[in-house]
Amino acid sequence: MIRLVIADDHAIVRGGLKQIFALVADLDVVGEAVNGSEVLDCVRLQQFDLLLLDLNMPGISGADLIRRVKAHRSDLPLLVLSMHNEPPVAARMLRAGANGYITKDCEPDILLAAIRKVAANGRFIAPELAEQMVFDVISTAPRPPHSLLSNREFEVFGLLSSGKSVNQIAAQLAISNKTVSTHKVRLMEKMNLSNMADLLRYAIEYNVTG
């Protein structure tokens, strides 16, 4: 039996996942979390076999949350279930410590296969993403500017694109306003963006909004 915790801030998503898992004999949902703090509480206080994690939740999220989870339990299998189907996003989460990455538009059989493989200490990437990542490696075409960002810069970029202010981002990431502003300046320089309007247009064009 695979005991898992579902971390997603949308009740309808959690409900749908539980309906799928109720149809199979080897999965048991033993906990739920709706924000980063609850995820960390589950990791500290509960015993379970796999964390099924959404990337965009209130509070700590994304690569930062993955790193914190792994700091508490380095051996905990962690599977990201995200709306983002961008290979650079998947690659960042895997580098942060995720054991697998699939998208929310995947078929239930892919989801179940991913959970079972990751719970068995394997690794799993959504097939369409794995294909894109392979071809990205061998491609001679220029990479999009956001692929040049560090993990923290990419995180700040996503929060800016979702409409959050520097103060809100600082509070969410538990860093200073000055640090957020520095990341903002650097990411805009790397991406050759002049203002927030440019940043928002870029985020929509490349489907990398927070």
Image: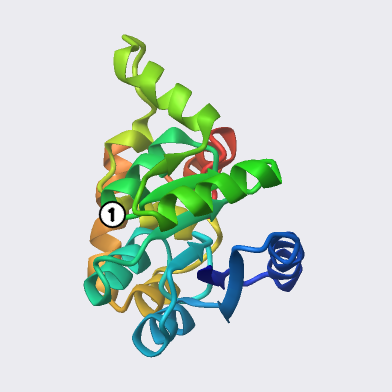
**Along the horizontal axis of the image, is 98 left or right of 34?**
left
Please give the residue where the numbered disc 1 appears in the rendered image.
96
Identify which residue, 45 or 33, lies in the foreground: 45
Mark 1 closeness class: few <14, some 14–19, many ≥20 residues within 10 Å: some
Nearer-the-camera pick, 134 or 150: 134
What is the x, y in percent for residue 119? 43, 58
**190 vs 27, nearest the viewer:** 27
Residue 33 in view here: no
Q: Position of residue 127 (x, y in %)?
A: 52, 30
> Residue 183 falls in which quadrant of the image?
bottom left
Q: Which residue is at 47% across, 44% downward?
A: 199
Rendered image quadrant of residue 47: bottom left
Vertical placement of 157 versus 14: above or below? above
Q: Amino acid at mark 1?
A: Ala
- Taking the image as shown, residue 23 lies to the left or right of residue 37, namely right
The residue lying at 52 percent from left, 54 percent from top is 115
Residue 72 visible somewhere in the drawing: yes
Depth order, front residue of 22/9: 22
Q: Residue furthest top?
A: 140
